[in-house]
Image (cartoon, grey):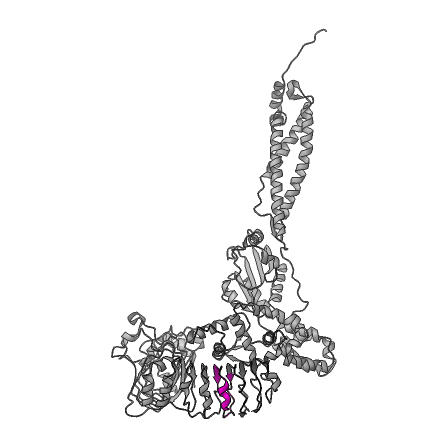
Amino acid sequence: MGNLIGLQISCDNVLNGFSSCFCGEVNYIRKFNKNLEELRTAMNLLSAKRKDVSRRVQQEERNGLRRLAVVQVWLNNVLAIENEFQEVHTACLVELQRLCFCGICPKNLKSRYRYGRKVFLMLKKIKLYCSEVFEDVTQPDIDMMEERPIPPEIVGQETMLGRAWNHLMDVRTQTMGLYGMGGVGKTTLLDQMNNKFRGANDGFDIVIWIVVSKDKAWDRKSKSQKKTGIHTSMRQMRFVLLLDDIWSKVDLKDIGVPFPTRENKSKVVFTTRSREVCGRMGVDDPMEVKCLGSNEAWDLFQNKIGKITLESHPRIVELARKVAEKCRGLPLALNVIGETMACKRTVQEWQHAVQVLSSYAANFSGMEGEILPILLYSYDDLKEEHAKSCFLYCALFPEDFQINKDKLIDYWICEGFMDTKEHGERAINQGYEVLGSLVHRCLLSEHVENGSYVIMHDVVREMALWISSGRGIHKERCIVQAGVGLCEVPGDEEWKAVRRMSLIQNKIEQISSIPESPELTTLLLQENYKLVNISPGFFLSMRKLVVLDLSWNRSLDSLPEDISNLVSLRYLDLSRTEIKRLPIGLQKLTELLHLNLESMIRLETISGISHLSKLRILKLKDSKMSLDTITVTELQRLKYLEVLTINMITSSLVLKQFLQAPGLVRCIKDIYMAKLEDESFRKLTLPTMPSLSNLMIQSCGMGEIKMEGTTSSWNQFLKTPCFPNLSKVSIQHCNGVKDLTWLLFAPNLTRLKVWFSKELENIISDEKVTSVTEAQTGTIVPFQKLEYMQLLDLPMLNNIFKSPLPFPNLRYISVRNSPQLKKLPLDSKSVVMVEKLAIYYCEKEWIEGIVWEDQATQSRFSATLKPW
């Protein structure tokens, strides 16, 4: 065999030699078995993780969420890795069967290297995918900035949209509320705001829109599901969340929404029908979306009915304006009624529309199907039945009627809508709470200029009438023909089933019928100025009648004796009628709670009033009759009396008897003293009167007005206001009075008028009150609530108060013929809103002689000075 040399080299030596040449790459061969085992383990873990993630995605998708794109990519890649693993693993098993070289080395070293490298790289990739952590796998099923469909032309919201957008973009605004009645255009406004974000370069990452009231899937979700769904989209984003039509507080924390702050620069905007919800959402200054003005409403209505219809007859424009006016600027009504009338091109059709909308609008096409159901949500949102009854009651008044709040609540109490256990102030407070809830839900609106009145929108009123009639099924139960020009009451047939009838503001002159009305509980007949007579027999069958209002019937001078048949009557208003004597039958109304006889300028007596044993409210202000000792004695027998207003007291004996009657003093609300000039009346001593609201003293000869129990040291009584509800005081022609220091006991005084009192020297006397600062006496600073002060013809007046006062609510001062008054109690800090104050004067010499606290005070009030 010649020079052959046998050579034996171990595999390890070979690999070690390779290691020195190829460094880490030889590990593909050396660690092949170990890496392959790790690969199997890692693949099992990754497959298990894929199943867990997939199961979680599917569960959240069933809750209406959408999987994140990054999660879907990961799942797809893991599936691909699993398929690749199967191929590689199978090939590696085949390769291991070809072992040689001591059972370790492959027959083909190059092939071993190639498979080893695949295993190593796949193991590295699988470990990378296993390390992926998904805190969130889904998001709400929305576009980042989804465009909302809006009408091609929107009328009347340009200004409101601009205001709302500017307010939202203000860095100080994090949460914004838009509120208004149903159908007023809140959602349309929010749609436009949403769409503005699509073209705005404002830095927001996502705009989320949720219609809370209509999203049934949303309602079915638990808090945790809502939180998971929303939080995924917002945690690291600058977002805008638009919540449409919310009916209660949406707790952002509970649904996973990061609270918007100046730091995260996110925003939340919501719409609601409830002003109360705005407050609960932390928005104290929400923007009210109001009905359109008359011009804007007409523009919208014209757009809906079209030019061809408007020009089809010369009279149609005039009739169309009347129809548009019936909508009172409510876009929902303008749109629906406009669309309905778009094809009506005869005068007769338009006349019919006016007639239907004026009589019973629910019969108009589209009202029951499209308008009233939308408004009905607000009614259904009233949780308590008594609140619903109170709301429906407001429909008894004429269109656009200014409803007095106090009178409305008196109706409600006597109708039994309030808690039967509540009486007096507590019942009134409950009534105001209900009234506030109706206003906050935009079912009523407060009068713009006078907060003592509320108004019901005409379309809301139509809804209330529709509900009261059993949604049109029982129209006979509630008959409202208020302000429609009736000259006579409805026919006898209409009285048989009626429960409530309102005939306010008509032209009825005679009531001569004797109707059968066994179910009637409410009859409103006020403001029929021509009503002269109610014939005997009219009240015979009204044994269930609870409320009867005959006020403001200035020609009515008598009542039939059969009023005694109203055995269930609790409320009777005869104010501003010409009735001279109350019928004897009135004394049989033993269930009567409320009797209003104010401004009855011909009423001579209320003899027999004590028979009304359950009477709680008796109003006699500005009536002709004067109190005498017999009447005061009768009033004292009314044990449940809570509110009393009385006319002039002209006898010092009667006044003394009255002021010594604790039950009457407790409930007196208005009192008028006049012509008390006899010698025995030198000093007027007033007891504590907790209910007194209005006090007028005229032409009285007393030299001093003091509080019962006061001594020369007034300060000890200042902590106890004896007149906590006194808001109006008028002192006229009281020439002996030197001061009105007793006003310190009236901390809520808003109006003070002092005229023609020639010996008055001080409003608040320094001698009687040595110190009135809060630090020294612990009392309320005088005149904190004062809005109006009139000082006329007071020649000796030299002092209002010894030091400057804050006067936070003062709006009006007038001074005439009071030359000794050289200084007003003002300084540079008095009257916060000085621009709303007016100081009227008559004599130029007086204003030029005023001594101001300092130059800053004079400069502050110079613009308020106005000649009278």
Which residue occupies the foreground of this view, 740 or 226? 226
Which residue occupies the foreground of this view, 832 or 413? 413
Percent position (x, y) of residue 657?
32, 86
Percent position (x, y) of residue 472?
63, 75
Percent position (x, y) of residue 295?
63, 77
* Residue 2 occupies quadrant: top right
Residue 562 is inside the magenta segment: yes
Seen in the image, is 309 located left or right of residue 267?
Answer: right
Seen in the image, is 742 located left or right of residue 94?
Answer: left
* Residue 105 occupies quadrant: top right
* Residue 121 occupies quadrant: top right
Q: Predominant secondary structure in magenta?
A: loop
Q: Quadrant of the N terminus?
A: top right
In the rendered image, the vertical position of residue 799 relative to residue 189, given as above or below: below
**Residue at coordinates 63% horizontally, 57% vertically from top-left?**
145
**Residue at coordinates 30% horizontally, 92% vertically from top-left?**
678
- Determine the residue located farthest toward the top in the rendered image: 2
Percent position (x, y) of residue 807?
38, 75
Which residue occupies the foreground of this view, 315 or 274? 274
Visible residue check, residue 439: no
Residue 567 is inside the magenta segment: yes
Visible residue check, residue 656: yes
- The stretch in magenta equals 548-575
In the rendered image, the vertical position of residue 245 relative to residue 399, given as above or below: above
**Residue at coordinates 31% horizontally, 83% vertically from top-left?**
660
Seen in the image, is 60 located left or right of residue 87?
Answer: left
Q: Quadrant of the C terminus?
A: bottom left
Seen in the image, is 28 located left or right of residue 601?
Answer: right
Which residue occupies the foreground of this view, 741 or 847? 741
